[in-house]
């Protein structure tokens, strides 16, 4: 896997203000495993990309961008990430997934 992909996964997490602890708990993996994903030591499984894209509210293709500079500037987080429970994170991910699916459907209807 490209180093860029691992770097992108980490950069998006940090930009949105999520801690390793929060994301690893949400994914159901240890912090050590998340660090391996983000350092390109272990390959990131498809289901992890899917969960991360839902949580972060981004299309899965974003993780594979060659140049994240432009994209990172457009990332915003509309909520505080400290004090979020694992249940909150699942709710946030479901909501963002619904919004992304809605936007995709709107684009198809254009």
Image: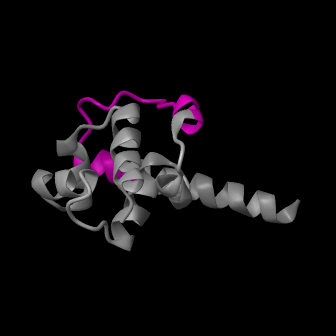
Q: Position of residue 69 (x, y in %)?
A: 53, 34
Q: Quadrant of residue 70?
A: top right
Answer left or right for 87 relative to 107: left
Give the residue drawn at x 18%, y 51%.
Answer: 35
Q: Position of residue 21 (x, y in %)?
A: 17, 44
Q: Tell me the quadrant of the picture where the C terminus can be found.
A: bottom right
Q: Is residue 70 visible?
A: yes
Residue 81 falls inside the magenta stretch: yes
Q: Please identify the residue farthest to the right as the structure is shown.
A: 110
Q: Position of residue 85 (x, y in %)?
A: 23, 43
Answer left or right for 96 relative to 110: left
Q: Tell me the quadrant of the picture where the N terminus can be found.
A: bottom left
Q: Nearer the viewer, residue 1 or 34?
A: 1
Q: Nearer the viewer, residue 102 or 58?
A: 58
Q: Is residue 83 above or below residue 96?
A: above
Q: Position of residue 55 (x, y in %)?
A: 41, 51
Residue 35 falls inside the magenta stretch: no
Q: Is residue 25 visible?
A: no
Give the residue drawn at x 49%, y 57%.
Answer: 64
What's the magenta region? 70-91
Give the residue drawn at x 41%, y 41%.
Answer: 12
Q: Indicate the colouring scheme.
A: one colour
Counting labels gives: 0
Q: Quadrant of residue 10?
A: top left
Q: Please identify the residue farthest to the bottom as the structure is shown.
A: 46
Give the residue drawn at x 15%, y 59%.
Answer: 33
Q: Nearer the viewer, residue 21 or 71?
A: 71
């Amino acid at each position: 896997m490209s180093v860029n992909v691992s770097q992108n996964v980490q950069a998006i997490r940090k930009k949105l203000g999520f801690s390793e602890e929060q994301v690893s708990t949400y994914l159901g993996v240890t912090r050590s495993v998340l660090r391996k994903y983000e350092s390109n030591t272990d390959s990131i499984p498809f289901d992890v990309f899917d969960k991360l894209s839902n949580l972060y509210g981004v299309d899965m293709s974003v993780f594979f961008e060659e140049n994240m500079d432009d994209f990172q500037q457009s990332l915003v987080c509309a909520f505080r990430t400290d004090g979020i429970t694992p249940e909150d994170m699942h709710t946030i991910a479901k909501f963002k997934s619904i919004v992304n699916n809605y936007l995709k459907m709107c684009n198809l209807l254009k």
